[in-house]
Amino acid sequence: MVAIAMLAMLAGAGPAAAHNALVSSDPEDGAQLAEGPERITLTFDQFVQDADVNQVAVTGPDGGQWAEGAVEVRENVVTAPLRPLGPAGEYTLGFRILSADGHPVAEKIQFTLTTAGTGTPVAGATAPTDGSDPGTETGAADNAEDETGSGGVPIWVWIVAAVVLLGVGLTLALRMGRNAQ
Ligand SMILES: [Cu+2]
């Protein structure tokens, strides 16, 4: 049994075979629906790790969010509750899941709602635009805290400052070296 398992691992160790691949979904990519399903179902070729990074988002034609609630993992099947849909048009289903091999996999599929429903999107949640959202929803506020270092200055500001200073220092050093000759 161990030898077979090891052979299977070796056979599947190629980079293409390593990541989870989406086998099927409900709704399907490119589907035309008169009504949305109660939940999104994503089926993969191998098991998905149950982790906090697993996310499913459904963005409507007006930018509203329609997936709400916990993402559930059962072996190779991921499900997420879907609200009753609203405006007719194209919906984008985006997901990020943790592969069996530990790598995150993100993909987008699209489906079209042909008949407008009476549903309403998740309150206060709109598709992220340029990242300047002040964080009216709790998720955005959490993210802002994560990216903030001590003193309320985001870490990236220090990194940019360090890179700029390094560039200035190198330029000065080069000029001084040239003048000295
Ligand atoms: Cu991988």
Image (spheres, grey):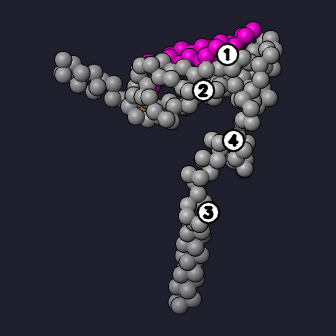
Looking at the picture, does residue 24 appear above or below residue 179? Answer: above
- Mark 3 lies on residue: 152
Ligand 1 is within 8 Å of the C-beta of the residue at disc 3: no
- Mark 4 lies on residue: 137
| Mark positioned earlier in the residue sequence (2 or 4) | 2
In the drawing, does residue 18 fall left or right of residue 27? left
Question: Residue 103: x percent and y percent?
Answer: 44, 35
Look at label 2 and name its amino acid: Gly
Q: Which residues are magenta?
A: 19-45
| Mark positioned earlier in the residue sequence (2 or 3) | 2
Q: Any mark on residue 83, and which?
A: none
Q: Residues within 10 Å of mark 2 (few under 14, many from 20)?
A: few
- Mark 2 lies on residue: 69
- Mark 1 lies on residue: 30
Look at label 1 and name its amino acid: Gly
| Mark positioned earlier in the residue sequence (4 or 1) | 1
Give the image quadrant in which the ligand numbered 1 is located: top left
* Residue lying at 62% horizontally and 63% vertically, measured from the top left: 152
